Image (spheres, rainbow, N blue to C red):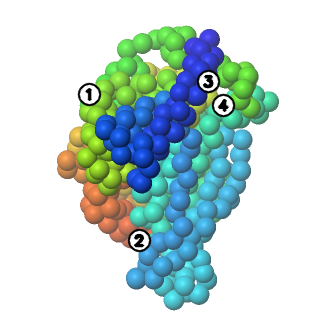
Amino acid sequence: MIYQLHELNRQLLAPFTELAQANAKIFGTDGTWLSSLPGATRLAAGNELLHRIGKDYEKPPFAIHQVVKDGHDVPVVEKVALDRPFCRLLRFKRYTDDAENILGMKDQPTVLVVAPLSGHHATLLRDTVRTLLPDHKVYITDWVDARMVPKEAGAFTLDDYVAYIQDFIRHIGAERLHVMSVCQPTVPVLAAVSLMAARGEDLPRSMVMMGGPIDTRNSPTAVNNLASTRPLWWFEQNVIHTVPPNYPGRGRRVYPGFLQHTGFVAMNPERHFMSHWDFYQDLVKGDLEDAASHRRFYDEYNAVLDMPAEYYLDTIRVVFQEHLLPRGAWDVAGERVDPAAITGCALMTIEGELDDISGLGQTRAAHDLCTGVADADREHFTVEGAGHYGIFSGRRWRTQVYPKVRDFIAGHDVAQPRKPAARRTARGQSAKR
């Protein structure tokens, strides 16, 4: 019922938000007589703010059309490499062949960026992808808004997520592949690679895990506490709703994006209030650069997707409540997940010192689980002064994190023998398998 009420409210407000947009243009367009009226600037600013608060935010485009390599502009085309009901595997294909030959781009390693399915679209990692592209062939998981997936496509669980990652790895080919998981997907990615290792399948050359909840018993955050202090039935009764009939996924049970967005804002309401107030003041003062920066940020931040209910509830139970992965008690489709089975695949973990979503030590815990990875093939980096988003987007990502990621991938891009190697015990000391 909440979803239906939200849709009704959205439709009722739509004419007013559109009128606000029109008023913002009428009073804010230079050269018109209305823009010269007293108070016109404030009227335009107030109406644009009202429009942006009430409007719908669609998924923004990646809009990566070219990258610069050694001073050369290299065109980029976004292509669908694999299309599944709940996810599209995208490749950012760099052109032309002549440019790639001249710049040595044909012989670069491949990176699969596994984006989180946790509210925002994969475009949140636009800066991650753009930074990787000059030195790597890049793929990304582009998760589909569950309200757009017909109910006939069936359910999507955490086990299905793991299976998708395995299929993507096989489709791309593991020979020179490096998998980078950001936030939530560190858990299913580690499970996917662990199961492939146990079956004797070819593994990626390395895994780069960034700010993820491998073991949320370490430095629990407010997000962790919320998930662990309420029973599973509470989430099912309070945040799971049915998609209304005006969407292709009508009848599907989801965790709606608008509820997730409310939770995001509730974590720091003062900051968002001040950000919108500053935006209004920037418009009044004519500070168009800062106003444009605000628009870019909230165009991305306010664009959210619905998550499949089965997947969301699985994640709450497996990751945050029962801690099945670090306890060695997680079964995926009847197979036990054993990260110790991973050999010949390097491991890098990255954490933000000030991360308030995945606390310090939660991602680093992967090293204690992956005991089959040799000491020489593992690395950890804590980014001083960085919050959650700073480790994969923005200045710190580009200047501090990426150089280490690039060098780590380059150092492990040559095929390594897949045999038992010196490993670590749970206490971090070297041992023999």
Discs 4/3, front: 3
The local secondary structure at tag 3 comes to helix
Q: Position of residue 209 (x, y in %)?
A: 41, 49
Q: Position of residue 348 (x, y in %)?
A: 37, 55
Residue 191, compared with residue 326, is above or below; it is below
Within-10-Å neighbours for mark 3: few <14, some 14–19, many 20+? few
Residue that carries the numbered disc 1 in the rendered image: 270
Discs 2/3, front: 3
Residue that carries the numbered disc 3 in the rendered image: 11
What's the amino acid at mark 3? Gln
Q: Are marks 2 and 1 in contact (CB under 8 Å)?
A: no
The local secondary structure at tag 1 comes to helix
Residue 223, compared with residue 422, is above or below; it is above
From the viewer's side, name the closer residue of 249 and 152.
249
Residue that carries the numbered disc 4 in the rendered image: 147
Does the image show residue 294?
no
Quarter occupied by residue 8: top right
Residue that carries the numbered disc 2 in the rendered image: 410
